[in-house]
Amino acid sequence: MRGIIGWGVHLPHRRLDRSQISPIAGTGGGKGRRTVASYDEDATTMAVAAARAALRGRSVSPAAVWFSTTTPAYLDKTNATAIHAALRMNRTAAAYDALGSVRSAVGALRAAMAGAGVALAVASDVRIGRPGSADEAAGGDAGAAALVGDDGDGPVVAQLVGSASLSEEFTDRWRVPGDVGAKVWEERFGETKYVPLATEALKAALGEAALDAAGVDALIIAGMHERACAAAAKASGVAPEKIVDRLAATVGNPGAAQPFLLLARALEQATPDQTIVLLVLSDGAEALVFRTTDAVSSYQPAAPVASQILAGAPIDYGRYLTWRGLLAVEPPRRPEPARPSSSAAGRSTDWKYGLEGPAGVLADQVGTVTTFTIDRLAYSPSPPVVFAVVDFDDGERLPVELTDVSAEEVAVGMRVEMTFRRLFTADGIVNYFWKARPSRAAGDGPSRKDAA
Amino acid sequence: MSSHGIKDRVAIVGMGCTRFAEHFDKGTDDLLREATSDAFGAAGVTKDDVDAYWLGTAQSGMSGITLARPLRLEGKPVTRVENFCATGSEALRQASYAVASGAYDLAMAVGVEKVKDSGYQGLNAFPIPNDGTQRTLTAAAMFSMVAPAYAQRYGVDPEQIKTVLARIASKNHANGAKNPKAQFRKEMSIEKLLAMPPVAGGLSVFDCAGVADGAAAAIVCRAEDAARYTESPLIIKALSFVAGNGSGLEDPSYDYTHFPEVAASASDAYAQAGISDPRNELAMAEVHDCFTPTELVLMEDLGFCERGTAWKEVLAGTFDLDGELPVNPDGGLKSFGHPVGASGLRMMYEAWLQLRGQAPVERRISTYGSRSLALTHNLGGYPGEMVSFVGIVGTA
């Protein structure tokens, strides 16, 4: 039996309150919060974080990683190979990108399902829109991963029992590479296209599973067209209380990551023998029908979505705009860093990407801040640099930059974990390496069953 | 195997030093010509009399041609050396060994740095292509971690430590204020220093060395020939150098309250010179006060006082110009300025002036006339990963 054997989600630490937008941008904004990737995160680093959460506590190394994003760090160069390296996957394991639209994430999951052995489908997006736009407010940043395998690879928690795929060419939403925001056709056009597609795909997939709408315990509808998603939910015949919350008020729509994020959310609330449908509206419609197994109740996610939603810290809109490059502030008066050497980096992949040194792998260790300093002179894309000497629990020491922490909250004795980040970008080369961040125990949040 | 040293075999017979300053109107060539010309004059020789040259510069030029071209040297060997901020001392060490070996009769060590052409404040290292995982922290931030670590280890109140550091800066500013060649010639009260905003950890700009252009030079010969050039040479007693292997950065037992490389080079230097009680035998010390916490810890690493007591000695004025053991009587890196490749030789220049009674009375060390040995200490790098030089000279 092949199916989902695990999942992992990464919600970035910072949250933007949408009420901050319109006083500055003059328009846009709204209620609730959206997640904001740190200045040192991108789709690749958030995918690494989500994948690490999915793999935590497992000894298995995936035979393939399928990475989907609409906001890749690179074109022409594979992004999934950085994820592959950061996860210290075997050289013979495949690493592929599926780029461009939310639909690509479903393609990644289907590819993982179709393969043999353990495969990882991971999706991640940094959703940007022009200041004041609907996309800016509605978007969210996240990474989410689904780990796929057979029963022998770890108990299957959700089995794929039916699916349907409808592809259709129409230009409802589009974004030219390099553009900040997407453009959309008249909203009603997309709605009239998507609702029938959704209805047809849902019916076909449920039919394959010998079910009907009444047998659905949770219906996830993902896609960039919010109005179409809502209308498709109404047209589905599934009871409103069984439509999975799209987390608009707390996370926002993280694009390619939305299908896996909402699937993880649904699985964390699921009980055995339930039917969960993932319906994705993106240039057609994709429907995947999952049946949960007994194993779903004993699965312990490394960082439950509910507790990650409750965690985090606010960011003000000005700094958000700066981080996304939408507000050009005075740079630090220090020399820009030189681009990392590709040949030197190529020789140190184990260290630079895997954080594997002579004494072992530091990536998965927890440590304590022994001493620290705040450097207001050093170059940083977001000064000041918070730097600490970290002593890991197994005895290793690493002097390393901290992230997801303000200068005021760092303290000697603070517990930290390692996170894969981009230190800076020079000549277009993204300089990936590891930082430490406060280990904000996921257990601080509510347990998975009673989470709202 | 042993570090034998060259005690009493080599003499410094002439020195020169430019003013250290933001010399926007002077280039590397100008600074080199000025410092070397003064040194030639002091020794009563010409550039042709000097058989070999060692040029120390961290990043103001490459190869010996950097010196040979502005001095128009003809057929002379010139070696460019670099060893982080201890570059100037390294040039002196190499030139001294060259004459001690008998290879040359007369050699010159020159140090220079033209840091103010970068367009940026502070010192900026020339980037060597790498994998992008190196720390990009400033030296100020790396050294700033020393102060809280020291306070914690010895149970000193953090506010008290701030006062101690300000006391060090204030002392060096007071010494520099009296020195016409120093970059900063303004006294700074402890109250004013304490009010400065932090830029790296708890350190303000006034806890950091002055960033200056400058050059300094020394001419050395075998000790038995010294009288040909001067009536009052400085005799080299010890030259010690340790390059750390960087293990302190990964060593969980390293606590940022001491610099093992400094302690090792000091121990070697004292053995070479036959010194057993530096605090009472030395007339003065020029130490590498790149940041105020550095000078604090150096007092212990160099054996001037017991571990955990330097902060009390600083407050007691032990290292003041009129104290028991004057430290950085010329103002130090803090006030005299720190043109990287020149600093080691600038320290030696102060020993040259003070031990030989050429420092004016108003800034003469308290020990003048009663003691005759001076120590120079020059380091480069960071806590956990540094190079350290210790030199000792005397008048007899």
Image (cartoon, coloured by chain):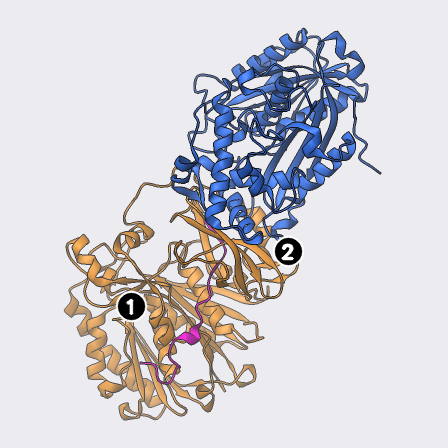
Considering only vertical position in the picture, is A312 above or below B207?
A: below
Position of B158 with respect to B262 (left or right) is left
Q: Amino acid at mark 1?
A: Asn
Q: Secondary structure at mark 1?
A: loop
Where is residue A327 drawn, in percent x and y? 27, 47
Instruction: Give the position of the C terminus of chain B as an image quadrant.
Output: top right
Considering only vertical position in the picture, is A432 above or below B102?
A: below
* Dot 2 alpha-carbon crowd within 10 angstroms: few under 14, some 14 to 19, many 20 or more: few
Q: Amino acid at mark 2?
A: Ser
Please identify which colour was used for chain B in the image.
Answer: blue
Out of A430 and B233, give the one closest to the viewer.
Answer: B233
Q: Which chain is orange?
A: A
Foreground mark, 2 or 1, reads 2
Considering only vertical position in the picture, is B338 above or below A145?
A: above
* Chain identifier of the residue bearing label 2 in the image: B
Residue labelled with disc 1 = A253
* Chain identifier of the residue bearing label 1 in the image: A
Out of A296 and A416, give the one closest to the viewer.
Answer: A416
Q: Secondary structure at mark 2?
A: loop
Magenta region, residue range: A430-452
Residue labelled with disc 2 = B253
Residue A375 lies in the magenta stretch: no
Out of B109 and A266, give the one closest to the viewer.
Answer: B109
Q: Quadrant of residue B369?
A: top right
Query: Is label 2 on the same chain as label 1?
Result: no
